[in-house]
Amino acid sequence: MSDVQGTTTEQFAGLVDQLEKNLASGADVGASIAVYHHEQLVADIWGGYRDEAKTTPWDRDTLVNVWSSTKTMTFLVALMLCDRGELDFNAPVSRYWPEFAANGKESIEVRHVMNHCAGLSGWQETFALEDLADWDIMTGLLATQAPWWEDRSLTGYHAITQGFLIGEIVRRITGTSIGQFLKREVTDVLGADFFLGLPESEEDRVSIVIPPPPLDLSQVDPESILARTLDPNVFDPTGPRYRWFRAAEIPAGNGHGNARSVATIQQVMANNGQVNGHRFFSEKTGDTVFERQVGGVDQVLGVDVSFGLGYGLSSASVPIGPRSCYWGGWGGSLIMMDQDLGLTISYMMNKMGDSLDTRRTEFSMLAITAALR
């Protein structure tokens, strides 16, 4: 009997074989894959187990922390507010959040926050991991902090800080948290099973992520942007084990969903602003995502990246189509959209891999090849 459940069209059946292979080899413990092609759900599969001990099967509605794939939800919200005329990406952040202007940040624009150029890739102050659940502490520290670099053409991946920065801009504009806005304006509209701030009522469906091998920063200059950003006191893969972490809004990295729910939402990008008759932003606004804002070797990621208002674009390290955008999460998750192909690819899993992990590349290439047939 196959370990993989769900359905695919014949065209995308190769994804089943690949997931079965990964589960058999141990590359995956539990995972889900979803693909939309021209607004049709052509693959919706899952398999394996929710736990490392392999005692509880991964079900159709299993939820998992998707780490930085959550960031794409904040990008979508920002695009919606821009389309409504409430947010200008070229405006200084302080227009919406006056306290942010402190310590030399007066000229930092919203687009710099969207594209990891703001110089705030980590926190200067130390704090307890549990403080990530305290919105006022996290945003207050960022508001008073000086940027770590001044050249706004340089990126340094804002691994955790970006969600608080975008989220506070959204809160100042809308008067509500970014998680509440996302629920009201997007997930409830689409019926998507995704949460930024997991309700206790959903706890029995959660698969806790399995941490990857520890990061070895012993040979890295402790004063470097890389080391300061990936502070192990904050960048901790065990966070999702705790109820307080799952319940909090940490918009750069603690959204809970599965491949189907992430794809259901992010196919908005593949369809340039609309899904199932619901228009979330105009095509003109959507087009701006594919205008390269900044790129080069990132000071934290260490690879060549290109950004277009949050989403990753084609670069030397990720060669994709001219109307493609993507992002992924720590350990392996992926969400990728291609407007030319009308394609959305989503892979969400519980076993976190290391930097050499190839699973998301394998699944995305299979789906793209199938779509081109």
Image: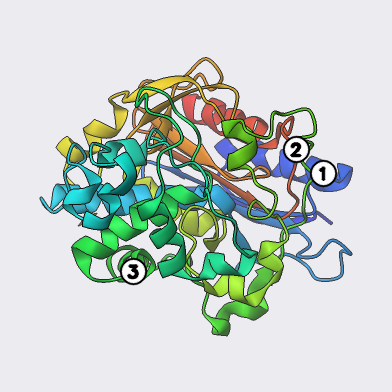
Residue 252 horizontal side relative to residue 179, left or right: right
Local secondary structure at mark 3: loop
Write the residue at 21% across / 66% down.
174
Q: Quadrant of residue 192?
A: bottom left
Q: Quadrant of residue 313?
A: top left
Which one is earlier in the sequence, the residue at label 1 or at label 3? Answer: 3
Residue 214 position in % (x across, y down): 80, 44
Q: Residue at x 42, y 36 (%)?
A: 119
Instruction: Check the image and name the residue furthest to the front.
Output: 103
Q: Report the residue marked by disc 1.
A: 213
Colour scheme employed for the rendering of this structure: rainbow
Position of residue 91 relative to residue 96, above or below, is above
Whether residue 257 is visible here, answered yes or no, is: yes
Q: Position of residue 149 (x, y in %)?
A: 43, 30
Closer-to-camera residue (75/112): 112
* Residue 354: mark in rendering: 2
Q: Which mark, by number, is residue 177?
A: 3
Q: Nearer the viewer, residue 284 or 227?
A: 227
Marks 1 and 3 close (CB-CB < 8 Å): no
Instruction: Report the amino acid beneath label 2.
Output: Asp
Which of the marked residues, 1 or 2, is nearer the chain's N terminus? Answer: 1
